[in-house]
Image: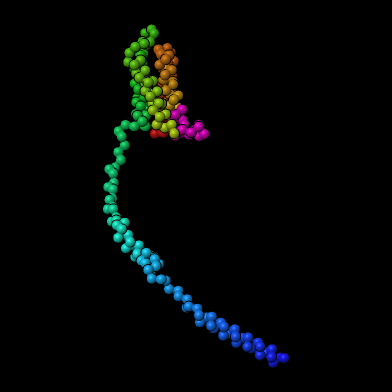
Amino acid sequence: MKRRGKFCNIAAGISLLALSGIVYAGDKVLNLSLPPGSDFQTEKFQPLTSQSFRLAANEGGMVQDPAPVSFATPDAKFQEPWMTINKAHKYLGLGTLALVGLTAMTAPDNEGGGPPPTTGTHQSLGRTTAAMAVATVATGLLAHWDDIYLEDSFFDPDKMHAALGTLGALSMLYAVSIAPRGGHSSAGIAGGIAMGVAIKLTW
């Protein structure tokens, strides 16, 4: 019995081997090559390289010659305008101080004891001085508004300059308004001193 079982196993193995060989022989060999005329064999599916990009761009006219580089010539040296708001503020301030001195020098003596004159050079200079003081403050605010900060100390030079200049202009206006009464000269001189100190702080 045992011999017959072994024989059957060997026979079955030989039969399976023979059957597999027949099946394999009937199959075609697998062809991995692409059929002729396939799109994958055309040039557009060739590996892309920098050379192929360059050639394709040249054929399509996409590559253009670089535009000529033009170097801008440096502009002429910047020249500040002959008159600016800041310059007007400066000249008006100096002119106001000069007029303060001229106004004081032309004050009448009034030795006769009568009322002081209400017309003349002194009065004209006083009014002109007050007007120039107001113009000085106005141009200063326009030119330096961004330089004044409320959070800064009162002793900040810019803030003190603005405060003393404004106080001086107000004193001159007060002197003109009460002239020719007594005390107007003191107010005018005090205003001139305040404006002189203001100019000195930022000179």
Residue 148 or residue 168, whichever sits in front: 148
Give the position of the N terminus as an image quadrant: bottom right
Quadrant position of residue 84: top left
Residue for point 43% across, 14% down: 178
Residue for point 34% across, 16% down: 124
Is 3 in the magenta? no
Residue 15 or residue 66, whichever sits in front: 15
Q: Where's residue 10, x and y in %?
A: 63, 88
Is 149 in the magenta? yes
Q: Where's residue 82, x and y in %?
A: 30, 33
Q: Is residue 77 above or below residue 99?
A: below
Residue furthest to the bottom: 3
Q: Where's residue 139, x and y in %?
A: 38, 28
Would you say residue 13 is visible in this rendering? yes
Q: Is residue 63 above or below residue 163?
A: below
Would you say residue 49 is visible in this rendering? no
Quadrant position of residue 169: top left
Q: Where's residue 79, x and y in %?
A: 30, 38
Residue for point 37% across, 17% down: 127
Give the position of the C terminus as an image quadrant: top left
Q: Which residues are magenta?
A: 147-163
Colour setting? rainbow
Q: Is residue 200 above or below residue 132?
A: below
Q: How many labels, in total?
A: 0
Residue for point 40% across, 26% down: 138
